[in-house]
Amino acid sequence: MRTRREIEAELGQKKPDHVIHTTLKTEYATLNNVICKFYLPKKITDPVYLSFKPSAEGRAIGPLHEMKVQGEVENAGRLTTFHADHVYTLAQAQTHWVASNIVEHTLIAEAWDLEICHLFDPPGHLTSPITYAAFALSPSRLLEPSLMIERRYTGEVKVETNRVCTLSLANGPTLSFKKHFRYEDLPWGECLSFPELVAEFEEPVDTREFSKLVDELDDVLLLASLAERHSSVCLGWTTNRGEASHSRFFRRGIAVPKETKANTNQYMIHPIEFQEYLRKSYSSFVASPNKKGLRQAIQLILSAGDNTIEAGFLKLFIALETLVSWFKEKERLEPILETKEQWEQLRTALQHLLREHDSLKDSPTKRELVYQKLPELNRVAFGTAFRLCIESLANAGLNVSDLWPVVGHERGTPLADLRNKLSHGVLFTPPQISALIGAQMHLRWCVERMILALLGWPIEKSNVSREKLSCTYFDYHKLEESQGAFASR
């Protein structure tokens, strides 16, 4: 989290991209004719900052306020509109000029959904379809194209694209993943260039269907992120509606992934297989009745590495339980007794039996504690549901017998036991924390194999196959040693 002084220092060295009069709307008031400076990001992963100079009425707007901002400016017969529904103030400052008794009030805010639209034909903007769009994406090594860059002594730069990843959306156009280059002039006469990953299409699309395309692109990026084991998200887009308008939207209401160095050994899918994987997995995802569960499981896997060892392990287990819960729902395994009447009859009979039991008949308090556990009898045990889920995916090539067991004590302490101890606050010793790292790796591989099986991608063509794990990961061979750390507890 950046401090107020750091943000103020950065904006003080920047020239604003736009300065206009705007209208601010908060929950309590509307302020008109407020001067606003727009600082657009140099890189697509940077925040969108706004700086306001409100009148005395605006001094009541403090940090963490939510505002709506809108404004427009006309230049050479062209109307440009600015609009954001989610703007959050980050800092405020006051400068008091004693001699003239003037107080200058400044608000610094961040916009989560700023749209800047240049209207060449305002009536046509409302009716024309979108003819071109470029979605700005955070870095993804697997999605980016292969480029050959030739730099000559004259300053000329020649860029040739050798390979472009393409994908047809289920209900929309074909996306091409390309690189666009942006430039920044530096004060000492040099020019800084940097590439940005985009997904483009050049087909007519109804404006009313555009939000669905964004949702579909998010799913594509989620599957690509799974393959790379690093998140890539859509952070905005540029659209053209023929000759009617040109718009740019900055999407910041989501977590922006941190940039990492490329490491092909960490990928779940090898770059050679990626294009085929993306098409196959996306087709299976679109046809899946469990899109929400798959989304949640993948998102949990991707974010598990951002936490402590214990929190990351629990996140991965939640991902596993998400997949098992969907299986139970699909197979209608719960409740065991389908009707409420059947369960009530059984519960009444069990309560009568417990009241007459020698260990409980003289202790109402203990009986009540046992009664509170009775609803669990109408639910399938997690271990049973997990085994049935694994068996159902065997036809898709799923086999987890070489990994740390999730349930059952036949081969040492199962992962489910570690999950129960962590969630109930059991403290692990340092050797057990070290062993938990290996347990977390095995749990990740198990969940990744399950997802690949659900997506119809052969596990042997991935880096979580038995052969690849055996060649790549030392923790794969330390199973018995890691399990031994938990044998005494």
Image (cartoon, helix red, strand yellow):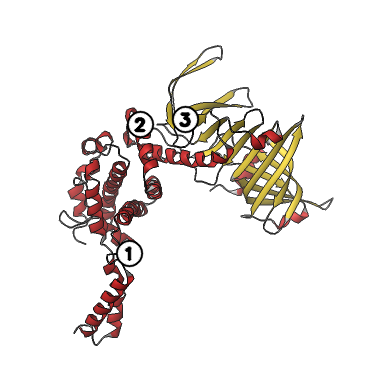
Callout 1: SS: loop
Cβ–Cβ under 8 Å for marks 1 and 2: no
Q: Quadrant of the C terminus?
A: bottom left
Going by the numbered disc 2, the residue's amino acid type is Phe
Q: Mark 3 against mark 1, which lies toward the viewer? A: 3
**Residue density around tag 2, few if under 14, some if 14–19, many if 20 or more, within 10 Å:** some
- The mark found on residue 424 in the picture is 1
Dot 1 or dot 2: first in sequence order is 2
Could you say where residue 26 lies in the image, as x and y percent from the top left?
A: 68, 55
Going by the numbered disc 3, the residue's amino acid type is Thr
Going by the numbered disc 1, the residue's amino acid type is His
Tell me which corner region of the image, top left, top right, bottom left or bottom right, holds residue 48: top right
Q: Seen in the image, is 109 located left or right of residue 406?
A: right
The reply to whether residue 15 is in sight is no
The reply to whether residue 20 is in sight is yes
Q: Where is mark 2, residue-wise?
A: 274
Tell me which corner region of the image, top left, top right, bottom left or bottom right, holds residue 349: bottom left
